[in-house]
Image: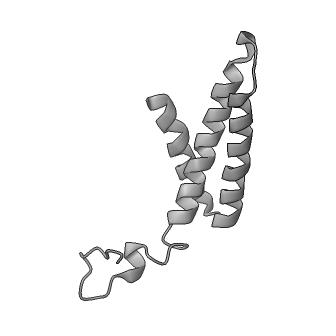
Amino acid sequence: MLRLAWPFVLGVAVATGTEPRPEPAMFLLAASSVLLLLMMLLPTDPARLWRRGAMLTFWLMAYGAAWQAYRSPRNDALHASNVLSGEATGAVWVSR
């Protein structure tokens, strides 16, 4: 499980430091999703199975970066830091 979590966390950390716009991050996620799907569905010999794991690692990093780019306070209008008023600084806004 940790092998799957570290690439995601690394993608979130990179996106936190660089603050990309959501559109390029989502495009990278979509492109890597297509490549991952092709690698998983196409037959391969046992000597090259490691490529699937490498592609999954790249996809998890792209997913983490896209998640952070989409959910960052700068890009998300519904983020708690953007909707809280001065009177209710400890409250969390719940969508309808």
In the displayed structure image, the side of residue 55 where residue 89 appears, left or right = left
Q: Residue at x 58, y 49 (%)?
A: 63
Q: Is residue 60 left or right of residue 52?
A: left
Q: Is residue 18 left or right of residue 79?
A: right
The answer to which image quadrant residue 86 occupies is: bottom left
Decide: is 23 above or below 78.
above
- Say how many tags the image has: 0
**Is 57 above or below relative to 46?**
below
| Residue drawn at 55 percent across, 49 percent down | 64
Of the 4 image quadrants, the one containing the N terminus is: top left
In the rendered view, would you say 95 is above or below 27?
below
Quarter residue 84 falls in: bottom left
Q: Residue at x 60, y 63 (%)?
A: 19
Depth check: 10 or 83 in front? 83
Q: Position of residue 92 (x, y in %)?
A: 28, 73
Quadrant of the rendered image containing residue 87: bottom left
Which quadrant does the C terminus fall into?
A: bottom left
Task: Using the image, determine if residue 15 lies above or below residue 60.
Answer: below
Query: Could you tell me residue 85's position as x and y percent?
Result: 32, 87
Q: Is residue 16 visible?
A: no
Q: Is residue 71 something one can see in this rendering?
A: yes
Measuring from the top left, give residue 11's x and y in whole percent: 57, 47
